[in-house]
Every structure is written in C-alpha cells, then in structure tokens.
Image (cartoon, helix red, strand yellow):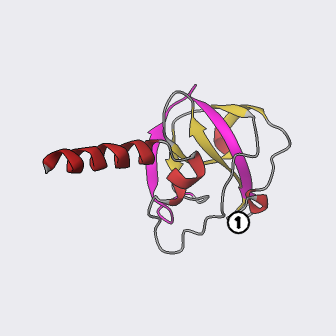
Amino acid sequence: MRLPLITLAAAATLTLTALPAAAATSSQPAAPGCNRPAVSNLDPGWGVMRGSYNLKKGPYSGKRCGTVTKLHQGAVLLFFCWTTNEYGKMWVHTGVKGTSLRGWMSLDNIKVTKTSGMPDCGLAKP
C-alpha cells in the first residue's frame, strides 16, 4: 500500500518542478497591497546587477512586497517582462541565471541590460 503513495509523491514533485517560471512566481504569497501583474516570458534579454539588492515578490521596494532573496553585484538576471509601478518606477520580472529563483528587480539596480524593448507584463495572458 505504501508504494502507490511514494509514487504519487514522486509524481507531484516532478510536476511542481516542471512548472513554468510565471507559475512559480504567482504561487509565492505577496503582502497585502503588493499588486503584481500576470507574467509571461516575453523578453529574451538579460542584465547584470549593479550592487547588492533584494529580489522582490512584487514590483515595489520596501516592506510593501516581501523579499525572495538578496542578490549581489554581478549576478546575471534573465528578463521575462516589464511593468511600471504606481510610483513610476520600471521593474522587470526576472529569473536568476543558473537558479530557479524568480522575482522582481527595479531597473535602477541593473547596470548592463540587453532587452527586446521591455515588453509589458500587461500583455501576458493570465
């Protein structure tokens, strides 16, 4: 009887591992008031971190949106899509190259960028 349970657990693990980046981010809990648009991988671009900054759960700094992790100078980010928050700041939904980490980074924190035109996350299909 335990073999089917182990098999189901293994299948569930494989299913969760295979989720696309957008689904992985949307499942992260965000703080109340941390508005996030739907996301898709619309930009094949990349960027390099200017210094040490927090990768956020939404496109806002401070405590409004939680922190995924702290990234350091030189980390390479893979771009997915972009948004401008209600304060007029441009943020990118991104993944950290070589990891499964996903989150939001302010354009102010990225020193080198290659982008296909900063496609708006609002174009993403929910």
Rendered location of residue 57, percent (x, y): 51, 56
When asked about the image quadrant of residue 94, the answer is: top right
Rendered location of residue 45, percent (x, y): 75, 34
> Can you say which quadrant of the picture contains the C terminus?
bottom right
Q: State whether residue 15 is above or below residue 77.
A: below
Residue 107 visible in rendering: no
Q: State whether residue 58 is above or below residue 108.
A: below
When asked about the image quadrant of residue 59, the answer is: bottom right
Give the residue number, with chain letter if any, for mark 1: 87
Report helix, strand or loop for mark 1: loop
Q: Give the residue at x 74% y 58%.
A: 124
Boundaries of the magenta span? 61-83
The verdict on residue 71 being magenta is yes
The verdict on residue 111 being magenta is no
The furthest residue to the right:
117
Nearer the observer, 76 or 62: 76
